[in-house]
Image (tube, rainbow, N blue to C red):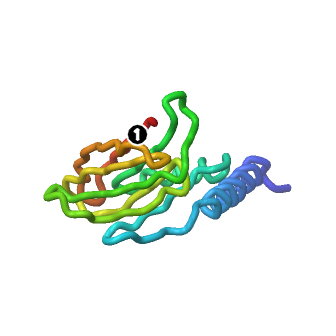
Amino acid sequence: MKNPITTLNAALLCAALLSATAVQAQQPALQKAGDVQYVCGGIGIDESTAMRAAMKDYPLSLLFATKTGDYLAKIQVVIESEKGTEVAQFQAQGPVCLLRLDSGRYTVKASADGGKAVSQSVEVAPAGTPGKTLDYRF
């Protein structure tokens, strides 16, 4: 007779691995703009869960929402270096964007529906340190 604890542990391990695979599969593809690699998404519960779980793997995250907390997509994003040079420009196709970029100081400008851009400055730390999150409310 098999040990019921061992059987339960094996079943839990399989379930955890399948869940992790399912969550990973829901994350949109990595894209590139200038020197920045990014992924934007978060529409739907599965994709939102996958994006939030992946935040720890990126040095910078951007969140877009209305002032009342409703998520927004199709946000125009411009990233500038400390010297004012444009590093990247893209349209965020979801309310969560995860970015890989070199460490340093940046200004991130975001605008919704062609409105006035909201700017935030951020210091991106070297790889291996906790990432930063910029929260934009329109």
Reply above or below: 135 against 102. above
Q: Residue at x 49, y 30 (%)?
A: 67
- Expressed as whole percent of the image width and height from the top left, the position of residue 17 reads 65, 59
Residue 8 located left or right of residue 83: right
Q: Nearer the viewer, residue 104 or 9?
A: 104
Residue 124 located left or right of residue 75: left
| Quarter of the C terminus within the rendering | top left
| Quarter of the N terminus within the rendering | bottom right
- Expressed as whole percent of the image width and height from the top left, the position of residue 3 reads 78, 51
- Expressed as whole percent of the image width and height from the top left, the position of residue 37 reads 39, 67
- Expressed as whole percent of the image width and height from the top left, the position of residue 19 reads 68, 55
Residue to which mark 1 is pinned: 135
Task: Identify residue type, mark 1.
Answer: Asp
Looking at the image, how many numbered discs can be counted on the residues? 1
View extreme (right): residue: 1
View extreme (top): residue: 68
Q: Nearer the viewer, residue 50 or 32?
A: 32
Mark 1 closeness class: few <14, some 14–19, many ≥20 residues within 10 Å: few
Q: Residue at x 55, y 68 (%)?
A: 29
View extreme (left): residue: 83
Q: Residue at x 62, y 53 (%)?
A: 47
- Local SS, label 1: strand
Q: Residue at x 53, y 48 (%)?
A: 95
Residue 82 located left or right of residue 19: left
Q: Nearer the viewer, residue 47 or 90?
A: 90
Q: Nearer the viewer, residue 125 or 98?
A: 98
Residue 107 located left or right of residue 39: left
